[in-house]
């Protein structure tokens, strides 16, 4: 394969206790994050209290934040102290990237994937603290370490402020939850949220819709998918099916012809069917809805990026259908679905050409995040 930068388009950072203590006001730091041992409850199950929300932990947090940590025989009840330091510390992350063969990592949060569910009294302060932490974290190597900000959509004005601050602090993108905004119920693409998109476009920041967690009550996933197995099977794709439907039917891409949009971590095998289904529904309901000038598939090819699992069987078909340069490659480190050898998983596939692999490992991220390829290190 030709030498090129290897870019992790969707890695993660884990907001450990130090983040909450060092970057939040003292009065909030004391209550924003707590691990509650099972011995405190009649059922013996560990819980986490995050920004006012008590979350039942059906897995040990260290097992959930260790690649392959939930494989049979691998779950050992790990705590924070057992998680690879690359989840918290920049020098360790850079060393790990060297071991994995990764030149650039674009980092998303873990706990703040749920930021949209935080209380009005704490949400803005915690997101602001996260941005300051990530700016400091990535300052260790601002070429190799990049970050994306969460943008809760509960308050449009607050969301605009988060975008503006993130741009000033060096973020390379922003992400939304695909879930309806709590309180208002606004969906992604609602024209009432156009000021947020105005800010993204003004700063040339791309928008990702990223899978959140089953505790996001506005999709009521925990009622429909009450255990971790069901959630892992269905929640990500369902989350992103909603999101892609909003993106492709709300008119937001027509209103913002330069906005770049990605659908992250919801797998990709369903995307060809979903594009066909959207086109088919417009045809069948033609007396009610005007079909857009471009089909859903054409719009996906021209305006959107997707990411799934590196070993997903349908990846090659989606790369052929959309173009490999529309398929973002991502590690998901340090989450349990991740691998310690992620680059090898992609490069060893025999159903992708070398050009397709290069496009996934490099070109797709360069274009989506607007990176200066010439300034990036190469492997």
Image (spheres, grey):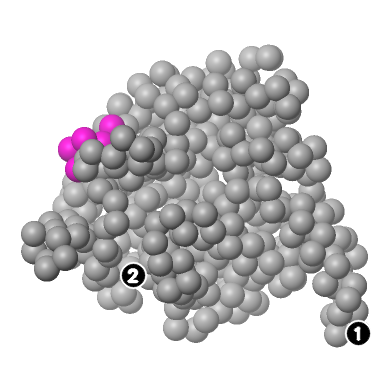
Q: Magenta stretch: residue 80 in it?
A: yes
> Residue extending furthest left?
39
Residue 118: mark: 2
For the point 74% across and 42% down, the residue is 318
Q: Nearer the viewer, residue 262 or 366?
A: 262
Q: Tell me which label, 1 or 2, sits earlier in the chain.
A: 2
Q: Examine the rendered structure and indicate whether residue 213 appears above or below residue 15.
A: below
Image-quadrant location for residue 226: bottom left
Q: Examine the rendered structure and indicate whether residue 107 appears above or below residue 92.
A: below
Q: Mark 1 falls on what kind of element?
A: loop
For the point 60% across and 44% down, the residue is 308
Q: Closer to the camera: disc 1 or disc 2? A: 1
Task: Give the magenta part as a residue range.
Answer: 79-84
For the point 21% across and 43% down, the residue is 77
Q: Mark 2 falls on what kind of element?
A: loop
Q: Residue 37 placed where, x, y %?
A: 12, 57
Residue 216: mark: none
Residue 287: mark: 1
Q: Examine the rendered structure and indicate whether residue 302 appears above or below residue 277.
A: above
* 91 sits left or right of 318 in the view: left
Decide if residue 343 is in sight here: yes
**How many angstroms separate mark 1 from mark 2 (CA)?**
41 Å
Decide if residue 157 is in sight here: no
Q: Residues within 10 Å of mark 1 (few under 14, many from 20)?
A: few
Image-quadrant location for residue 256: bottom right
Q: Magenta stretch: residue 122 in it?
A: no
Q: Quadrant of the C terminus?
A: top right
Q: Residues within 10 Å of mark 2 (few under 14, many from 20)?
A: many
Label 1 with label 2: CB-CB less than 8 Å: no
């Amino acid at each position: 394969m030709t030498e090129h930068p290897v870019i992790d388009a969707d890695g993660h950072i884990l907001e450990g206790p130090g983040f909450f203590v060092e970057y939040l006001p003292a009065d909030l730091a004391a209550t924003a994050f707590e691990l509650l041992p099972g011995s405190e409850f009649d059922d013996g199950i560990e819980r986490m209290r995050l920004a006012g929300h008590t979350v039942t932990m059906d897995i040990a947090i260290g097992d959930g934040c260790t690649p392959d940590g939930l494989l049979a025989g691998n779950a050992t009840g790990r705590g924070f102290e057992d998680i690879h330091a690359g989840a918290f510390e920049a020098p360790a992350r850079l060393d790990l990237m060297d071991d994995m063969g990764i030149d650039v990592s674009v980092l998303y949060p873990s706990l703040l994937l749920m930021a949209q569910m935080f209380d009005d009294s704490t949400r803005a302060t915690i997101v602001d603290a996260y941005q300051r932490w990530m700016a400091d974290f990535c300052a260790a190597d601002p070429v190799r370490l990049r970050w994306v900000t969460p943008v809760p959509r509960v308050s449009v004005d607050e969301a605009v402020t988060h975008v503006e601050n993130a741009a000033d602090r060096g973020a390379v993108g922003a992400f939304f939850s695909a879930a309806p905004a709590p309180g208002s119920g606004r969906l992604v693409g609602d024209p009432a949220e156009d000021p947020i998109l105005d800010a993204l476009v003004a700063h040339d920041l791309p928008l990702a819709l990223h899978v959140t967690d089953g505790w996001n009550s506005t999709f009521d996933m925990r009622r429909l998918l009450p255990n971790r197995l069901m959630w892992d099977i269905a929640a990500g794709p369902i989350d992103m099916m909603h999101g892609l439907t909003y993106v492709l039917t709300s008119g937001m891409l027509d209103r913002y012809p330069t906005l770049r949009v990605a659908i992250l971590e919801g797998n990709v095998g369903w995307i060809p069917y979903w594009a066909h289904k959207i086109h088919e529904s417009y045809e069948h309901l033609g007396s009610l809805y005007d079909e857009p000038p471009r089909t859903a598939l054409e719009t996906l090819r021209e305006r959107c990026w997707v990411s799934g699992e590196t070993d997903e069987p349908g990846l090659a078909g989606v790369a052929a259908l959309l173009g490999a340069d529309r398929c973002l490659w991502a590690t998901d480190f340090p989450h349990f679905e991740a691998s310690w050898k992620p680059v090898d998983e992609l490069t060893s596939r025999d159903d992708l050409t070398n050009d397709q692999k290069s496009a996934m490992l490099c070109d797709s991220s360069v274009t989506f995040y607007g990176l200066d390829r010439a300034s990036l290190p190469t492997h």
